[in-house]
Amino acid sequence: MKKFKLGCQLNYTIFQFTTFLFNVQVVNNNCQNIVQEQLQLNPFLARDEYISSNEKNRFIRVNAPIGKLEISYQATVELSHYYDNYHNIYEVPLAELPVETLAYLYPSRYCQSDLLFGLAQSEFGNLNPGYSRVMIICDWIYDKVKYLFGSTDSQTSAFDTATERAGVCRDFAHLGIAFCRTLNIPARFVSAYAYNLNPPDFHACFEAYLGDRWYLFDPTKLVPLTNIIKISTGRDAADVSFATLFGTVEMNNQYLCVEDISDVQDTQKSEEFQAIAIC
Protein backbone atom coordinates (compact mmCIF):
# COMPACT_ATOMS: atom_id res chain seq x y z
CA MET A 1 0.00 0.00 0.00
CA LYS A 2 1.24 3.47 -0.90
CA LYS A 3 0.55 6.48 1.31
CA PHE A 4 0.96 10.11 0.29
CA LYS A 5 0.66 13.49 1.95
CA LEU A 6 -0.25 16.13 -0.61
CA GLY A 7 -1.48 19.66 -0.93
CA CYS A 8 -1.92 22.75 -3.02
CA GLN A 9 -2.22 26.49 -2.46
CA LEU A 10 -3.75 28.87 -4.99
CA ASN A 11 -3.65 32.66 -4.63
CA TYR A 12 -5.78 35.11 -6.60
CA THR A 13 -6.40 38.83 -6.93
CA ILE A 14 -10.08 39.47 -7.73
CA PHE A 15 -11.06 42.61 -9.65
CA GLN A 16 -14.83 42.07 -9.71
CA PHE A 17 -17.31 39.80 -7.96
CA THR A 18 -16.34 36.31 -9.14
CA THR A 19 -17.72 32.80 -8.87
CA PHE A 20 -15.06 30.08 -8.63
CA LEU A 21 -15.52 26.36 -9.21
CA PHE A 22 -12.61 24.48 -7.65
CA ASN A 23 -11.76 20.83 -8.26
CA VAL A 24 -8.63 20.15 -6.19
CA GLN A 25 -9.85 17.51 -3.71
CA VAL A 26 -8.86 13.91 -4.40
CA VAL A 27 -11.50 11.33 -5.20
CA ASN A 28 -12.45 8.84 -2.47
CA ASN A 29 -13.03 5.25 -3.65
CA ASN A 30 -12.22 1.61 -2.92
CA CYS A 31 -8.60 1.96 -4.08
CA GLN A 32 -7.95 5.52 -2.89
CA ASN A 33 -8.81 6.15 0.74
CA ILE A 34 -8.66 9.63 2.27
CA VAL A 35 -7.21 9.31 5.76
CA GLN A 36 -7.34 13.04 6.53
CA GLU A 37 -7.99 16.23 4.60
CA GLN A 38 -8.55 19.93 5.14
CA LEU A 39 -9.62 22.71 2.78
CA GLN A 40 -9.38 26.35 3.86
CA LEU A 41 -10.34 29.67 2.30
CA ASN A 42 -8.68 32.93 3.33
CA PRO A 43 -10.61 35.09 3.90
CA PHE A 44 -13.29 32.73 5.11
CA LEU A 45 -16.15 32.52 2.60
CA ALA A 46 -19.22 30.34 2.37
CA ARG A 47 -18.89 27.47 -0.09
CA ASP A 48 -21.16 24.94 -1.74
CA GLU A 49 -19.85 21.40 -2.13
CA TYR A 50 -21.10 18.72 -4.50
CA ILE A 51 -20.02 15.35 -5.86
CA SER A 52 -20.76 14.26 -9.43
CA SER A 53 -23.01 11.22 -9.54
CA ASN A 54 -21.03 8.93 -11.85
CA GLU A 55 -17.36 9.86 -11.52
CA LYS A 56 -17.52 10.97 -7.86
CA ASN A 57 -15.60 14.15 -8.72
CA ARG A 58 -15.65 16.69 -5.90
CA PHE A 59 -16.32 20.36 -6.59
CA ILE A 60 -16.73 23.46 -4.46
CA ARG A 61 -18.32 26.73 -5.52
CA VAL A 62 -17.14 29.98 -3.96
CA ASN A 63 -18.57 33.45 -4.55
CA ALA A 64 -15.81 35.95 -3.85
CA PRO A 65 -15.85 39.77 -3.62
CA ILE A 66 -13.14 42.12 -4.90
CA GLY A 67 -9.84 41.57 -3.11
CA LYS A 68 -7.55 38.63 -2.39
CA LEU A 69 -8.40 34.94 -2.13
CA GLU A 70 -6.26 32.02 -1.03
CA ILE A 71 -7.44 28.41 -1.17
CA SER A 72 -5.31 25.75 0.49
CA TYR A 73 -5.90 22.00 0.51
CA GLN A 74 -4.05 19.22 2.32
CA ALA A 75 -4.78 15.51 2.39
CA THR A 76 -3.29 12.19 3.45
CA VAL A 77 -4.26 9.41 1.06
CA GLU A 78 -3.74 5.63 1.04
CA LEU A 79 -3.68 3.86 -2.33
CA SER A 80 -4.43 0.15 -2.74
CA HIS A 81 -3.90 -0.29 -6.46
CA TYR A 82 -5.60 -3.00 -8.45
CA TYR A 83 -3.01 -4.98 -10.44
CA ASP A 84 -3.41 -7.47 -13.25
CA ASN A 85 -1.23 -9.04 -15.93
CA TYR A 86 -1.92 -7.01 -19.04
CA HIS A 87 -1.81 -10.13 -21.24
CA ASN A 88 -5.14 -11.12 -19.66
CA ILE A 89 -6.96 -7.85 -20.38
CA TYR A 90 -9.19 -7.66 -23.43
CA GLU A 91 -11.13 -4.98 -25.28
CA VAL A 92 -14.86 -5.14 -24.66
CA PRO A 93 -17.10 -5.46 -27.75
CA LEU A 94 -19.22 -2.37 -28.29
CA ALA A 95 -22.45 -4.30 -27.75
CA GLU A 96 -21.25 -5.47 -24.32
CA LEU A 97 -19.84 -2.24 -22.88
CA PRO A 98 -21.49 -1.03 -19.67
CA VAL A 99 -23.88 1.76 -20.57
CA GLU A 100 -22.13 4.20 -18.22
CA THR A 101 -18.97 3.96 -20.36
CA LEU A 102 -20.63 4.87 -23.66
CA ALA A 103 -20.34 8.64 -23.16
CA TYR A 104 -16.56 8.19 -23.33
CA LEU A 105 -16.71 6.94 -26.93
CA TYR A 106 -17.92 10.23 -28.41
CA PRO A 107 -15.73 13.05 -29.71
CA SER A 108 -15.46 15.90 -27.21
CA ARG A 109 -14.19 19.47 -27.16
CA TYR A 110 -10.49 18.60 -26.91
CA CYS A 111 -10.60 14.99 -28.14
CA GLN A 112 -11.87 15.09 -31.73
CA SER A 113 -11.65 11.37 -32.37
CA ASP A 114 -13.67 11.79 -35.57
CA LEU A 115 -10.91 13.97 -37.06
CA LEU A 116 -8.20 11.47 -36.11
CA PHE A 117 -9.93 8.33 -37.38
CA GLY A 118 -7.68 7.89 -40.43
CA LEU A 119 -4.42 8.33 -38.51
CA ALA A 120 -5.53 6.03 -35.70
CA GLN A 121 -6.68 3.30 -38.06
CA SER A 122 -3.46 3.39 -40.07
CA GLU A 123 -1.25 3.28 -36.98
CA PHE A 124 -3.23 1.06 -34.60
CA GLY A 125 -6.19 -0.44 -36.46
CA ASN A 126 -4.46 -3.70 -37.37
CA LEU A 127 -2.88 -4.34 -33.98
CA ASN A 128 -4.08 -7.11 -31.69
CA PRO A 129 -6.88 -5.72 -29.52
CA GLY A 130 -6.44 -5.47 -25.77
CA TYR A 131 -4.39 -3.67 -23.16
CA SER A 132 -1.26 -4.00 -25.29
CA ARG A 133 -2.82 -1.90 -28.05
CA VAL A 134 -3.38 1.01 -25.65
CA MET A 135 0.21 0.62 -24.45
CA ILE A 136 1.37 0.94 -28.07
CA ILE A 137 -0.74 4.09 -28.42
CA CYS A 138 1.05 5.55 -25.38
CA ASP A 139 4.45 4.54 -26.78
CA TRP A 140 3.58 6.16 -30.12
CA ILE A 141 2.68 9.44 -28.40
CA TYR A 142 5.81 9.33 -26.26
CA ASP A 143 8.01 8.72 -29.32
CA LYS A 144 6.28 11.02 -31.82
CA VAL A 145 5.23 14.02 -29.69
CA LYS A 146 7.82 16.24 -28.01
CA TYR A 147 7.11 17.14 -24.38
CA LEU A 148 7.63 20.90 -24.50
CA PHE A 149 6.54 23.47 -21.92
CA GLY A 150 4.85 26.50 -23.45
CA SER A 151 4.16 24.81 -26.77
CA THR A 152 0.38 24.73 -26.28
CA ASP A 153 -2.38 26.68 -24.55
CA SER A 154 -5.86 26.15 -23.13
CA GLN A 155 -7.35 25.91 -26.63
CA THR A 156 -5.03 23.18 -27.93
CA SER A 157 -6.86 20.01 -28.97
CA ALA A 158 -5.82 16.44 -29.71
CA PHE A 159 -5.97 17.20 -33.42
CA ASP A 160 -3.62 20.15 -32.92
CA THR A 161 -1.19 17.98 -30.97
CA ALA A 162 -1.23 15.27 -33.63
CA THR A 163 -0.46 17.95 -36.21
CA GLU A 164 2.15 20.00 -34.33
CA ARG A 165 3.74 17.01 -32.54
CA ALA A 166 4.44 18.96 -29.33
CA GLY A 167 2.61 19.42 -26.04
CA VAL A 168 2.46 18.84 -22.30
CA CYS A 169 0.73 16.24 -20.12
CA ARG A 170 -2.77 17.49 -20.87
CA ASP A 171 -2.13 17.29 -24.62
CA PHE A 172 -0.59 13.81 -24.39
CA ALA A 173 -3.68 12.64 -22.49
CA HIS A 174 -6.10 14.19 -24.98
CA LEU A 175 -4.35 12.50 -27.89
CA GLY A 176 -4.36 9.11 -26.16
CA ILE A 177 -8.06 9.48 -25.41
CA ALA A 178 -8.90 10.44 -28.99
CA PHE A 179 -6.96 7.51 -30.45
CA CYS A 180 -8.68 5.06 -28.09
CA ARG A 181 -12.13 6.38 -28.95
CA THR A 182 -11.52 5.91 -32.68
CA LEU A 183 -10.95 2.21 -31.88
CA ASN A 184 -14.19 1.97 -29.84
CA ILE A 185 -12.28 1.88 -26.55
CA PRO A 186 -13.92 4.17 -23.96
CA ALA A 187 -11.33 6.61 -22.63
CA ARG A 188 -11.49 9.47 -20.14
CA PHE A 189 -9.28 12.28 -18.89
CA VAL A 190 -7.71 12.06 -15.41
CA SER A 191 -6.52 15.07 -13.41
CA ALA A 192 -4.15 14.16 -10.63
CA TYR A 193 -1.44 14.91 -8.14
CA ALA A 194 1.80 13.07 -8.90
CA TYR A 195 4.69 12.23 -6.60
CA ASN A 196 8.16 13.13 -7.95
CA LEU A 197 6.77 15.22 -10.80
CA ASN A 198 9.32 17.91 -11.64
CA PRO A 199 8.46 20.73 -11.51
CA PRO A 200 5.51 20.09 -9.17
CA ASP A 201 2.21 20.79 -10.90
CA PHE A 202 -1.21 19.32 -11.47
CA HIS A 203 -0.78 16.28 -13.71
CA ALA A 204 -2.92 14.78 -16.48
CA CYS A 205 -3.15 11.25 -17.82
CA PHE A 206 -6.03 9.02 -18.93
CA GLU A 207 -7.96 5.84 -18.27
CA ALA A 208 -9.23 3.32 -20.82
CA TYR A 209 -12.05 0.88 -20.13
CA LEU A 210 -10.78 -2.65 -20.74
CA GLY A 211 -11.95 -5.96 -19.35
CA ASP A 212 -14.13 -4.99 -16.41
CA ARG A 213 -12.63 -1.71 -15.21
CA TRP A 214 -10.84 1.56 -15.97
CA TYR A 215 -7.07 1.12 -16.33
CA LEU A 216 -4.59 3.96 -15.93
CA PHE A 217 -2.22 5.11 -18.71
CA ASP A 218 0.29 7.96 -18.91
CA PRO A 219 1.89 8.66 -22.30
CA THR A 220 4.29 11.20 -20.75
CA LYS A 221 6.03 8.51 -18.66
CA LEU A 222 7.09 11.28 -16.29
CA VAL A 223 6.30 9.28 -13.14
CA PRO A 224 5.40 5.65 -12.34
CA LEU A 225 1.67 4.97 -12.45
CA THR A 226 1.78 4.09 -8.75
CA ASN A 227 2.79 7.70 -7.99
CA ILE A 228 -0.47 9.13 -9.37
CA ILE A 229 -3.24 10.23 -6.99
CA LYS A 230 -6.52 10.85 -8.80
CA ILE A 231 -8.44 14.10 -8.42
CA SER A 232 -11.17 13.61 -11.01
CA THR A 233 -12.17 12.17 -14.38
CA GLY A 234 -14.07 13.59 -17.34
CA ARG A 235 -14.49 13.56 -21.11
CA ASP A 236 -11.50 15.89 -21.40
CA ALA A 237 -9.83 18.75 -19.51
CA ALA A 238 -12.89 20.97 -19.85
CA ASP A 239 -14.74 18.75 -17.37
CA VAL A 240 -12.08 18.68 -14.66
CA SER A 241 -10.23 22.00 -14.54
CA PHE A 242 -8.77 22.61 -11.08
CA ALA A 243 -10.26 26.13 -11.18
CA THR A 244 -12.98 27.58 -13.37
CA LEU A 245 -13.53 31.33 -12.99
CA PHE A 246 -16.53 33.51 -13.80
CA GLY A 247 -15.17 37.02 -13.37
CA THR A 248 -12.01 39.11 -13.76
CA VAL A 249 -9.22 37.46 -11.81
CA GLU A 250 -5.43 37.23 -11.77
CA MET A 251 -3.62 34.18 -10.41
CA ASN A 252 -0.69 35.30 -8.25
CA ASN A 253 0.74 31.98 -7.13
CA GLN A 254 0.26 28.23 -7.42
CA TYR A 255 2.06 25.79 -5.12
CA LEU A 256 1.79 22.00 -5.01
CA CYS A 257 3.57 19.34 -2.99
CA VAL A 258 3.36 15.55 -2.74
CA GLU A 259 5.29 13.49 -0.19
CA ASP A 260 5.57 9.70 -0.02
CA ILE A 261 4.93 8.71 3.61
CA SER A 262 4.46 4.97 3.06
CA ASP A 263 5.53 2.93 6.10
CA VAL A 264 7.48 0.61 3.83
CA GLN A 265 8.67 1.40 0.34
CA ASP A 266 6.33 -0.11 -2.22
CA THR A 267 7.52 -3.64 -2.98
CA GLN A 268 4.90 -4.44 -5.59
CA LYS A 269 6.12 -6.65 -8.44
CA SER A 270 7.74 -5.02 -11.45
CA GLU A 271 5.31 -3.02 -13.57
CA GLU A 272 6.71 -4.70 -16.69
CA PHE A 273 3.61 -6.86 -17.13
CA GLN A 274 1.33 -5.09 -14.68
CA ALA A 275 -1.79 -3.15 -15.55
CA ILE A 276 -2.84 -0.70 -12.84
CA ALA A 277 -6.21 0.72 -11.86
CA ILE A 278 -7.28 3.18 -9.14
CA CYS A 279 -10.79 1.63 -9.15
Image (tube, rainbow, N blue to C red):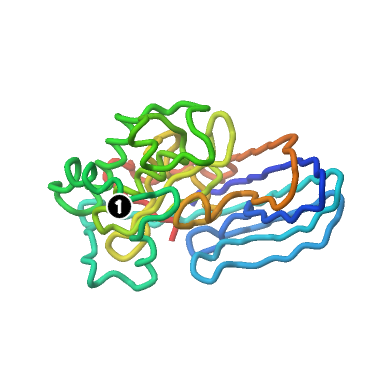
Q: Is residue 169 depicted above or below 4 in this figure?
A: above
Residue occupying image coordinates x 41% and y 45%: 174
Q: Where is residue 125 in the image (x, y as percent from the top left)?
A: 17, 48
Q: Where is residue 54 in the image (x, y as percent from the top left)?
A: 49, 69
With 207 as the anchor, is 242 left or right in this view? right
| Quarter assignment of residue 118 | top left
With 38 as the anchor, is 5 left or right in this view? left
In this view of the protein, which residue sits in the foreground, 11 or 192?
11
Amino acid on which disc 1 is placed: Asp
Q: Which corner quadrant holds the C terminus?
A: bottom left
With 22 as the anchor, is 139 left or right in this view? left
Residue occupying image coordinates x 52% and y 58%: 32
- For the image shown, how many numbered marks are present on the structure? 1
Q: Position of residue 172 (x, y in %)?
A: 40, 39
Residue occupying image coordinates x 65% and y 67%: 50
Residue occupying image coordinates x 53% and y 34%: 196
| SS class, disc 1 | helix
Q: Position of residue 209 (x, y in %)?
A: 33, 59
Which residue in the protein does label 1 denote?
Answer: 114
In this view of the protein, which residue sits in the foreground, 167 or 258?
167
| Quarter assignment of residue 277 | bottom left
In this view of the protein, which residue sits in the foreground, 88 or 63?
63
Q: Is residue 173 depicted above or below 221 in this figure?
A: below
* Mark 1 crowd level (few <14, some 14–19, many ≥20, 10 Å Cα): some
Q: Is residue 215 depicted above or below 140 in this figure?
A: below
